Amino acid sequence: MRLRPRARACVLCSIAALSGRLVAIPPAEAQQQPDYRRNTFGEIGIFDMPSAHMAPDGQLAFTVADLGTTQRYSLAFQALPWFEGSFRYSHVPYWLGAKTYYDRSFGMKIRLVQEDGSFPDVSLGIRNILGTGVYSEEYLVASKQIGSVDFTAGLGWGRLADNGTLPNPFGLIFPSFNTRPPARPTSHFSGIADFSQFFHGPKAGVFGGAIWQTPIDGLQLLAEYSSDEYKGESVTRHGIHVRTPVNVGLSYRPLDSLTLSGGWFYGTTYGFTVSLSGDPTTTAGSASRIGPPVPPPVVRDDTQQQQALKLMYDRNAYIAAERAGGPWVHVPTEAERTKLDLTQALLSESRGVRDIDIEGKTLVIDAYGQGSAQAQCARYAEVASAVGMRAISIAMTDLQNNDGLVTFCPVATRAKYAQSDAQSGSASDGAATNTTDQAALERTLRADFDKQKLSLAALSLGPSELWVYYENGHYRTEGEAAGRIVRLLMADAPPSVEIFHLIPTMNGLPMQEITIARSALERTTLAYGTASGLADAIALSAPPLDNPPLDRAAAGIYPYTYWSIDPKLTEQVFDPDRPIQFMVYAQGVAGVVLAPGLTIGTTLSANIWNDYLLTRPPGSSLPHVRTDLLQYIKKGSNGITDLEVVYQTRLARDVYAEAKAGYLEDMFMGAGGQVLWRPEDSRFAFGADIYKVWKRDFNRLFGAQSYNILTGHASIYYSSPWYGLNFNVHVGRYLAGDNGATFEMTRRFASGVEIGFFATFTNVPFSKFGEGSFDKGLIIHIPFEWGLPLYSQSSYDLRLSSLNRDGGQRLAGDDSLYEETRGTSYGEIEQHIDNLVEP
């Protein structure tokens, strides 16, 4: 759905975002880190051998290594302080006699003991968890820094046991560990963890080495003893020949994020390694970005603050008096005042109420039934809202009735009541809120919003409160946008306004309500404090379903159109005949927004250049739902990416829904929808989607093939409190008709960088699935803002599978609501809550 399309990624921006942050981290934010280097496998190590050390937490590194006729490309991620994961793609010529062979493998290293004054780092690692077994190697290694020299020693299994120095210590305890099956580069079951190989074999090898930090900053001298004799590659005279197990060379780090190393390997071969690393735990501040400057804070004087607070308190007492039959004289605390006001109002005005209680953000009412339970509950909600109750929902029950029924209903915001008050001019001191004042304020704010690259959708001005509806299409985090808006309101809002309500919208739909007490914000600003010092002065809640100011403003906004044209770059990897293939194309996006949430949009693409091999057959026994990709590129290089009608809405305060129909993606057309429930104050979210789709013609125009399928999934999302880890599970039916589940685990940093992996298991047997056995791969999300000195919502997104197969494949964008609502979700705003005070 595209109301205001976020900036599209151009080719140059894509390259810059991926490399700029890795190569040139500003010194002020460069992470202070140990001078550990990466080996030819992309791990923290020496040359070919691993060490026990770990990179700084979160580090992302890309390594290219050339060793004679062998090349390795590695992506490594310090997923946790004690866990390193890596994916590598290697050109292994003359493996077991084959002239050309490309190998894919996943590796991991776990730190068992952390280095301190007495103990070394001790780690356990596997270089080939899922793969063909070409680099089937496991190791137990220890490393210790002594002065300027870092020493490493370890035991190796598999290829690292080629020198066969010691009997397998595990085999001395468990005889089955003395037998190790051979590598299986052509097996259909490659891609499955083979536990019969790990740490198995009759012998264990010994390896080690040392790294000396020379007096020259960044320059190291390296030497290692390798236990890998490259037996598989050396069966012909063209492979690596090992004359001596000793490797020596130099490593130099000209930048914190760049390491260059080279040396003489195995007495016969020159080799070099280039490694780029980035720290996703850091993000540049506003001062270092190109864009609108942050508005300065404006603080009212003491007299203005006191008058505003008195007006607000008098106003609440006035409403309570009007509704309850008499003013409240004593207000011990805010919580007591609210409950007393509400109790009196409900008991006096609303029949049937026996007692009330407040449990968190839920108002519990004991009442005897009077007709429709929902209507009765709604009447109570109106009273609660008018009195200023900050509850989100009402739970109404009759405790004297044994049926145990409970009726729930939401509490509407006071915005609509404040709007009617503003129009009628009723205020506790007799002062009227002039509609001319609101119009003048709107003109001022709209001009200031435009300067900040934000869009003001609507506002409502009350005697003591101001509601602002806006859309952020420029800043990556909602906290950044809200913080800038707060600064504008501090300068432009009348001094009498004490409470700010900020409501970010998406496609014309309210997504979140951020309530801020102005006086508390001013005190924190003067003290250079953070949002944590504001405590309850900042509140996040789901916005109401009824938003009269936004509804009135919509008449002057819709319909409107949008469009953009951008160059794009896509890649196809891991084809055995050409491992890396590229396509450069032009992409045009256009559409018309008919009403809030209702859009007709299309994306067109035209090939500029590609080097795809278009002759390889799918080679799948399943319906070709993804392996026909090259057919779509060959016959539909110029075509329609999507053309669809989309309607988005909210079914409840925290329940979102979407329905769409048309050409949904490159390969499928049809209709369906999704629903997402994001419970407030919860780390969980729940979703479901269902679509009836037909396979599109290869030319990507208006035709369809005969293949059709009903596909859908139920999803659970969990954002854990541990290291920013996220866990998602999707269960249902896939495009090829197979049934199963997809498991995803990612780690998301405050910078927005997110790295993880996924695996899908269905009822398709591994043998029928084909090479790879099951669908699996990496999830990479890199915001351009992390790598460029710009404000941007664009990002580089990659879902990298080792193979393009048909099993376990989902419709593109089938659960897009989760990501679309993520930026304005409670957890995401709370994570960046300090931006409200210091954007």
Image (cartoon, rainbow, N blue to C red):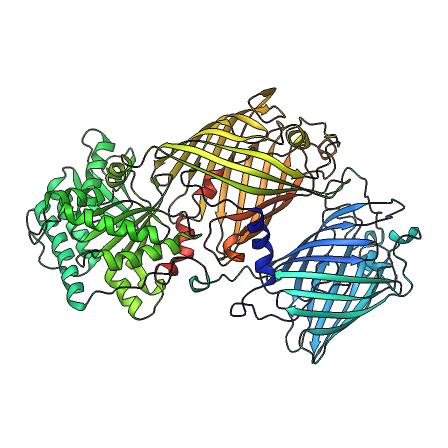
Q: Residue 434 at what x, y percent from top left?
A: 13, 48
Question: 713 or 829: nearer the eye?
Answer: 829
Question: 544 or 441: nearer the eye?
Answer: 441
The number of discs equals 0
Q: Residue furthest front?
A: 608
The quarter of the picture where the C terminus appears is bottom left
The residue that appears at 57% across and 27% down in the rendered structure is 668
Residue 210, quarter of picture: bottom right
The quarter of the picture where the N terminus appears is top left
Q: Look at the picture and state if 785 lies above or below 728.
A: below
Tell me if 540 is positioned left or right of 602 in this view: left
Asked if one can make out residue 239 in the rendered structure from this viewpoint, the answer is yes
Q: Look at the picture and state if 467 lies above or below 257.
A: above
Q: Residue 395 at what x, y percent from top left?
A: 28, 41
Q: Residue 201 at what x, y percent from top left?
A: 84, 54
Tell me if 112 is positioned left or right of 299 in this view: right
Tell me if 261 is positioned left or right of 276 in this view: right
Q: Residue 312 at what x, y percent from top left?
A: 16, 56
Asked if one can make out residue 397 in the rendered structure from this viewpoint, the answer is no
The residue that appears at 43% across and 64% down in the rendered structure is 287
Residue 68, quarter of picture: bottom right
